[in-house]
């Protein structure tokens, strides 16, 4: 069984985490889920937008009957996205705050890979950005300070992160000064010919160059556009078969993009588990009591996702308490 359609049918009926997914996108409010747009890409590049579902079971039915090769999450709308009747115009009301980091934006500064290829060396760019975000949103490093004049505070914050990794990542691993081609790329960043001629002045421009090589590159349109789609977690990459899994930004260095579970792997794992269970128990009753994803390498990413959901709920409860306190005065 290696036809992607057959694999997707098994994946959606047994492994896709519907309950957790619903818990996330309903945010404690069933209507929010119902008003949410989903977009499915079916085999043969058939693109279906404005799908909407009542709850996790309804979504599950949709996935099993259409087995999309890609799922995108749209905005929460003012009316049910699938609704055709009525005079009200479909309008996007809200959606998650999304920052899109695309490694292809780093093609001119990464020397190990290009385009869709990725290795552990260029994953470090993602690690740097994850750290940067934690810092912006009040992470562990927010109290760190450097003395740099006439530098915008956001750039200064980025520098705190970039500085310690710049030499090992860009100079050493990416070999940014090791070949003539790379040196030329480096020289272009210098302000004038005189400076280019003076090797020493290269180091005076060190800060500028660090920023150019490592400053977070984000597609701002994805963040600004309310109608922009977000690739769903736990959907399967149509070419590589890799499952889109969440990770904890605090442990970004430990995340290995190369060993992300593929749909082929998790289905092999689930079959192997069931077969073994049959041999041991004589029947599959034991296997049925355990959630299917727990039998596969999806268990760890699901653990990360559940932890995220737990914190989301905690934040919601705290918000409620704050609201009550406010009203109570
Ligand atoms: Zn690479």
Image (spheres, grey):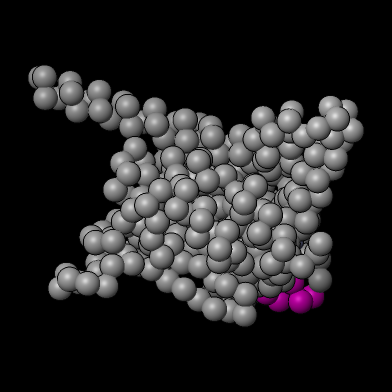
Task: Work out whether residue 22 or residue 310 is closer to the camera in this orientation and state it.
Answer: 22
Residue 254 rendering spot, x and y as whole percentages: 71, 40
Task: Work out whether residue 11 or residue 104 is closer to the camera in this orientation and state it.
Answer: 11
Residue 329 rendering spot, x and y as whole percentages: 10, 19
**Image quarter in which the N terminus is found:** bottom right
Against 185, is 62 above or below? Answer: above
Against 241, is 168 above or below? Answer: above
Residue 319 rendering spot, x and y as whole percentages: 28, 30
Horizontal relation, residue 117 to residue 51: left or right: right
Magenta stretch: residue 183 in it? yes
Identify the residue shown where x is 55% and y is 39%. Answer: 305
Horizontal relation, residue 217 to residue 175: left or right: left
- Among the 4 quarters of the image, the one containing residue 51: bottom left
Horizontal relation, residue 43 to residue 258: left or right: left
Identify the residue shown where x is 54% and y is 71%. Answer: 41
Highlighted range, magenta: 180-187
Identify the residue shown where x is 62% and y is 51%. Answer: 13
Against 169, is 143 above or below? Answer: above
Task: Work out whether residue 13 or residue 37 is closer to the camera in this orientation and state it.
Answer: 13
């Amino acid at each position: 069984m290696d036809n992607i359609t057959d694999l997707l049918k098994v994946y959606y009926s047994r492994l896709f985490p519907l309950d957790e997914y619903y818990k996330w996108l309903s945010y404690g409010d069933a209507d929010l889920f119902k008003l949410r747009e989903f977009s499915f890409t079916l085999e043969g590049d058939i693109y279906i937008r404005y799908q909407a579902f009542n709850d996790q079971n309804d979504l599950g039915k949709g996935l099993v009957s259409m087995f999309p090769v890609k799922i995108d999450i749209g905005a929460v709308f003012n009316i049910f996205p699938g609704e055709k009747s009525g005079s009200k115009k479909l309008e996007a009301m809200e959606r998650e705050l999304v920052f899109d980091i695309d490694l292809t934006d780093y093609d001119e500064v990464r020397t190990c890979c290009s385009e869709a290829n990725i290795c552990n060396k260029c994953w470090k760019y993602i690690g740097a950005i994850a750290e940067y975000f934690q810092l912006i949103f009040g992470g562990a490093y927010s109290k760190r300070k450097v003395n740099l004049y006439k530098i915008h505070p956001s750039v200064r914050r980025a520098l705190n992160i970039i500085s310690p990794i710049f030499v090992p990542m860009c100079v050493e691993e990416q070999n940014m000064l090791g070949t003539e081609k790379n040196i030329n790329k480096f020289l272009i960043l210098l302000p004038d010919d005189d400076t280019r001629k003076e090797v020493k002045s290269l180091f005076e421009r060190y800060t500028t160059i660090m920023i150019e090589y490592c400053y977070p590159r984000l597609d701002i349109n994805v963040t600004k556009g309310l109608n922009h789609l977000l690739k769903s977690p736990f959907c399967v990459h149509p070419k590589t078969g890799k499952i889109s899994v969440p990770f904890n930004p605090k442990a970004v260095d430990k995340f290995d993009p190369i060993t992300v579970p593929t749909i082929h792997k998790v289905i092999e794992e689930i079959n192997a588990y069931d077969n073994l269970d049959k041999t041991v128990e004589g029947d599959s009753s034991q296997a049925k009591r355990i959630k299917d994803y727990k039998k596969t390498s999806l268990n760890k990413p699901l653990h990360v996702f559940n932890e995220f959901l737990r914190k989301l709920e905690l934040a919601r409860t705290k918000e409620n308490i704050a609201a009550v306190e406010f009203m109570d005065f």
